[in-house]
Amino acid sequence: MSEYRPGYIEGKRKLGVYVDEEVHKALRVRAAETGESMGQIVERALRKELAQQERRRHHEVTGL
C-alpha cells in the first residue's frame, strides 16, 4: 500500500502556469458546464496542441 500524499495524483505531474484572467475565467466556466476539472480540460487542450505540432513537423519533414 502506498503512503498518502496530499495533492498527489498517481501517474500525474504537477504543473503551474500563468494565464490571462480571461482565459482562466473561460476555463472555470467550461469546467462548471461540463463537470470536468480544469486540469482535465487543460491536459486535453495541451495534448491536442502538441499532436498538431507533431503533425506539422512530420509534414515538413516528409512533405506528406
Image (tube, helix red, strand yellow):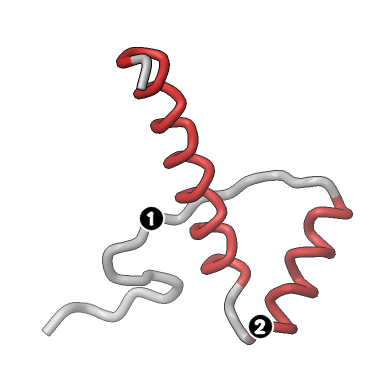
Which corner quadrant of the image does residue 57 belong to?
top left
Left or right of 48? Residue 58 is left
Q: Residue at 37% of width from left, 15% of height from top?
A: 63
Q: Amino acid at mark 1?
A: Arg
Q: Is residue 54 left or right of residue 1?
A: right
Q: Which residue is mark 2?
A: 34
Image coords of residue 41 (percent x, y): 58, 65
Q: Relative to 22, is 11 above or below?
A: below
Frontmost of labels 2 and 1 is 2
Most extreme residue toward the left, as rendered?
A: 1
Q: Nearer the viewer, residue 2 or 16?
A: 16
Q: Residue furthest front?
A: 64
Image quarter hosting the C terminus: top left
Q: Is residue 17 left or right of residue 13?
A: right
In primary-sequence order, the first of circles 2 and 1 is: 1
Give residue 61's quadrant in the image.
top left
For the residues labelled 2 and 1, the Cα–Cα distance comes to 23 Å
Q: State whether residue 51 is above or below residue 24.
A: above
Question: Which residue is more in the foreground, 33 or 2?
Answer: 33
Q: Amino acid at mark 2?
A: Thr
Tell me residue 5's x, y (percent). 34, 74
Report the quarter where the N terminus lies.
bottom left
The residue identified by callout 1 is 13
